[in-house]
Amino acid sequence: MIRLFNVYYPTRTIVLLLCETLIVTGSFLLATVLLTGPDTYLVLNYEYGGLKILGLTVLTLLASYYFDLYEPQRISARWEIYFRLLLVLGFLSFLLSAITYFFPAMDIARYVLVLGLTFLTIALVAWRSAYQWIIGHKVFRERVYVLGSGERAQTVIETLRTRKDAGMEIVGSDEVTPDKDRRKEAFEAAMEKFLGPNPPVDRVIIALEERRGELPVRELIKLRFNGIVVEDSAALLERLTGKLHLNSISPSSFIFSEGFRIKPSQQISRRIVSTLTAAVGLLLVLPFLPLIVLLVRLSSPGPIFFHQVRVGMNGRTFKVHKFRTMRIDAEVSGAKWATKNDPRVTRVGMFMRKTRLDELPQLWNVLCGDMGFVGPRPERPEFVPMLVEKIPYFELRHMIRPGLTGWAQVRYGYGATLAEAREKLEFDLYYIKHMTLGLDLLIMFETVKTIIRRQGAQ
């Protein structure tokens, strides 16, 4: 896997992205050469044809990204890949038609866009078919053995089976053996089978519930020197899922592992970026605020804004500001989490929650320093004591400023139960461990996709 902005991406996904970049660029470049002939150099250099093709490439890749074509784990069937691919090409065709109609100067040359889109459709469908064959062939997959027989091992197995883009194929795992001594003997015997000159595995994943007295250390050392990769299940799951699994975390994970270093210089740079982003955001949405205010006023009687106490950095409380999306009697019986299709939410409020318009006033919280633009979402003080008691390491969320958006928001969504709050914390801990300015910018970019797709809100 390749690490970019402290996020791990399968090598196959990066190769897919790079190859499609070449395909898109090559399709329009070929169309330009065929239709303009000897004038190709003039069209590309003096009529900005090269820049236009570059813009078309970026536009196509962005459309593919927003249709999840670079996240195969979210696509359940192969036909869905081609369906989404055709949606992207259809969207691109309509968009280019509109652009060239209103701005004729944006065209490269006569019929270049039409011919380029034709080449692109054929090339992308053929390339995706070839790519699906390549990643599905056993020759191109890494053989993996899962050493373990408990819940952790099952989590690894299920994750690898659903993440075909990881390029790993499970060739074996251990059966549950109740007796501890017999388990160690079984683990040692399993590892000894891989010590030959042509081992049937490329990687061994350690997924033992209890390592003391059970880990076949001598055999694993021999495997390591024989070129077989030996990896801890926690590290693998962290890379594949983008979260820290609480079941595999111990205090030593925070003490000895890389990450979890919150430097003053890093905090200052993040604060500057948050302030500038919030200021620009407020200026951009300012013309639309009167319309939002009117919609809230017409939706139901009550105040326009909703103020709620939240827990921020170092446990300090502050008031978060939002446009009101619920009826004024929503919490007469006490505080509770919002649920899916919550009856307390007004019709306008549901639209505002899906599009995140209700959270625009929180840009002021960012400017005031109560929040950052990126970070764990601030929790209500009514729930924090219960969450700290029920979920280990929950208080670590308060090490940094809460955020308007965050890693959990773009990768998971809203949590309305204790189990969901626990899983959200796993994403928040991953963010705190790998927190960098580059990761913040990536989250901001993915937030746009989340808003457009109207995902994650309740």
Image (cartoon, grey):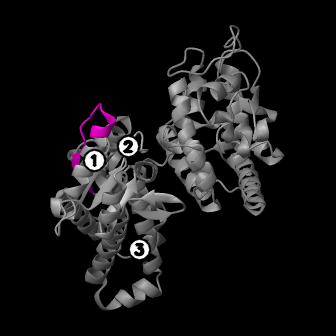
| Image height of 90 relative to 363, above or below | below
Side of 196 relative to 56 (left or right): left
Residue 86 seen in render: no
Which of pointers 2 and 1 lies earlier in the amino acid sequence? 1
Say what secondary structure mark 2 lies in: loop
User: Answer yes or no: do the residues labelled 1 and 3 have beta carbons within 8 Å?
Assistant: no
Mark 3 — residue? 53
Does residue 174 belong to the magenta stretch? Answer: yes
Q: Total label count?
A: 3
Mark 1 — residue? 187
Q: Amino acid at mark 1?
A: Phe
Does residue 42 belong to the magenta stretch? Answer: no
Say what secondary structure mark 3 lies in: helix
Boundaries of the magenta span: 168-182
Q: Estimate the spatial distance between the alpha carbons at disc 2 and disc 3, rounded to whole Å.
A: 52 Å
Name of the residue lying farthest toward the right: 368
Whole-percent x and y of residue 397?
67, 40
Residue 37 seen in render: yes
Write the residue at 60% across / 33% down. Answer: 392
Which of pointers 2 and 3 lies earlier in the amino acid sequence? 3
The answer to which of 217 and 234 lies nearer the viewer is: 217
Q: Estimate the spatial distance between the alpha carbons at disc 1 and disc 3, rounded to whole Å.
A: 57 Å
User: Which mark identifies residue 208?
Assistant: 2
Write the residue at 49% across / 39% down. Answer: 412
Whole-percent x and y of residue 235?
45, 53
The answer to which of 14 and 434 lies nearer the viewer is: 434
Q: Amino acid at mark 3?
A: Ile
Splitting the image into 4 quarters, where does residue 21 fall? bottom left
Circle 3 crowding by C-alpha within 10 Å: few under 14, some 14–19, many from 20: many
User: Answer yes or no: do the residues labelled 2 and 1 have beta carbons within 8 Å?
Assistant: yes
Write the residue at 35% across / 73% down. Answer: 25
Q: Estimate the spatial distance between the alpha carbons at disc 2 and disc 1, rounded to whole Å.
A: 10 Å
